[in-house]
Image: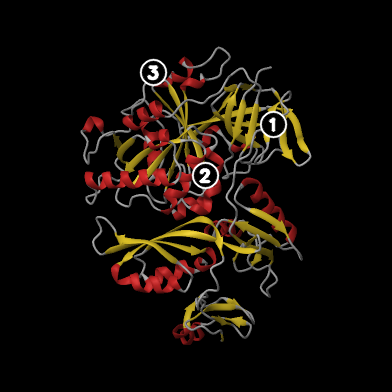
Amino acid sequence: MVGPLVRALFSTTTRKSISSSYSSSSFVKPFTHGSRFFSAATATAAASATEPGGALDPSRLRNVAVIAHVDHGKTTLMDRLLRQCGADIPHERALDSNQLEKERGITIASKITSISWKENELNMVDTPGHADFGGEVERVVGMVEGAILVVDAGEGPLAQTKFVLAKALRYGLRPILLMNKVDRPSVSEERCDEVESLVFDLFANLGATEEQLDFPVLYASAKEGWASSTFTKNPPADAKNMSQLLDAIVKYVPPPKASLDEPFKMLVDDYVGRILTGRITSGVVRINDRVHGLRDSDAGVVKIEEGKIVKLRKNKGMVSFDVDCAGAGDIISVAGLKSPSIGHTVANVEVMIPLPTVELDPPTISMTFGVNDSPLAGLDGSQLTGGKIGDRLLAEAETNLAINVIPGLAESYEVQGRGELQLGILLENMRRESFELSVSPPKVMYKIENGVKLEPIEEVTIEVNEEHVGLVMEALSHRRAEVTDMGPVPGNFGRTRMTLTCPSRGLVGYRSVFSSDTRGTGFMHRAFMAYEKYRGPLGNVRKGVLVSCARGTITSYALMSLEPRGTLFVSPGVEAYDGMIVGEHSRDTDLDV
């Protein structure tokens, strides 16, 4: 029996079994034959590139991740590539299927799909841009051989551009630089040359090899749906498409270095119910093949579970369909084993050597989740017990690389993550699932090395109007921030961009202060940099709170007299109890109300 070596990546958007996750009625037709750039030749690409055993020829495969800073156009670019290759896109940001992703307009979990282009099969991975979701980037870079680095031609490379690029370079990927949003009036050819130089310097500073430094450059407007190998702001009508980008992917991204003749293995990078998804690095896997799960331990290799493949599934455009077999280099979903999870290997039964696991950045912040013990417990949710809360958190840790859950005392759990946004998304998901729980304030995770106290330091990029620079710098100076670079924003008169390093503890709760100080006109992006020596205590950065001193129903009359005292968190009709925080005081002291 010949099988493949699969590197598995799991979507975190569903926890259903593979038999119930998909129904033919829930998907639109993947291809059309209208005016889109899709032909019968493309439709038969997979068949013409298929080996006699039924698996796709690895030389016809390209595995590519789309990486970028927040809001630089990754998901919009994916929409246009899907449309270009015939997929029926029901709405914008079609790959953002999670409800919170739709509401917030951000990508939270990595998504995988495939498209066909000129007898080649392109497996495309859309990744998050926020550093808080860096675990999603870390678990996909090992599955791909190339990356498209999307950079806003107006803004240039920012903090999280550096973060995601460092991950790609560490795994030996050779990115393709895509200058997006070149159709903006403020973007000129000189500006693009300047951004290209900044990106080159960033590559060099991150230790890129000579081959990686020789990156191809394309110019695009994902919103308008075109890409070009030469600078232009308005290409001819027959060139307003993504053909040149797709050709560049085929030309510059190497095919998987894989053999169809080696035994099957699969490294589990994510876990969703009974579905394991990943890249096959060698061999062929078929339905009914015998496989087992493996993991490394201090005592050696441990066999987790043995079973057989009962279903194989592949994404194409916006649909998912069953296949009978899959070969080396392809990205596939398999079902049949229940026990393997992230970091485990699934392989043919004769294989006893697991694959190496992905390297992870350490968590920098933690919160304690516990049972709701307030007088109002049980009024808003149905999932109340510590056991249910613990099961939900442990399930999250199985599917999310960047979260650690440590059981504590009195039915409490310490949840460690990458940032406030990541833990906030987890809290919101649990609230929508009818969980009720108490949560501690976030606290930073320190380290002690050689007797020296270390703390997580983040790189912060801030863009504000000139009149707000002094206020922002004063606030950050109290938070132990240090300015490393400062200058005007190209093409934006009256705007200033600052780059700082700041302890993570100094940034906890600062985003709302920043929005208030800049009247909502400022932008702030942050990314974990390193653990460095403790910078000392913070200045006076905490405001007091308004605390209820009695139980009862809040009235409009009571709130009117409190509004001058600070910012209120409650509205009329809400039940309050003694000790409940109802607002933030405008001064540094707490106030009983």
* Residue ID for mark 3: 41
Around disc 1, counting alpha carbons within 10 Å, would you say few (fewer than 14), some (14 to 19), or many (20 or more)? many
Q: Residue at x 37, y 74 (%)?
A: 471
Say what amino acid the circle numbered 1 marks.
Gly
Q: Position of residue 321 (x, y in %)?
A: 54, 29
Of callouts 3 and 2, the N-terminal one = 3
On screen, residue 344 versus residue 302, left or right, reads left
The picture quadrant where one finds residue 449 is bottom right
Q: Is residue 31 left or right of residue 404?
A: left
Distance (Cα) linking label 1 and label 3 = 35 Å
What is the crowding at mark 2: few (fewer than 14 residues within 10 Å), some, or many (at least 20)? Answer: many
- Circle 3: residue type: Ala
Judge whether residue 92 can be spotted in this image: no
Q: Residue 371 or 383: which is nearer the viewer? A: 371
Residue at which label 1 appears: 336
Q: Residue at x 53, y 39 (%)?
A: 140
Note whether residue 421 is visible.
yes
Q: Is residue 522 left or right of residue 459?
A: left
Query: Which of label 1 and label 2 is nearer to you?
Result: 2
Q: Could you tell me which quadrant the N terminus lies in? A: top right
Could you tell me residue 119's position as x and y percent? Answer: 42, 20
The residue mark sitting in front, 3 or 2, is 2
Q: Position of residue 588 (x, y in %)?
A: 51, 83
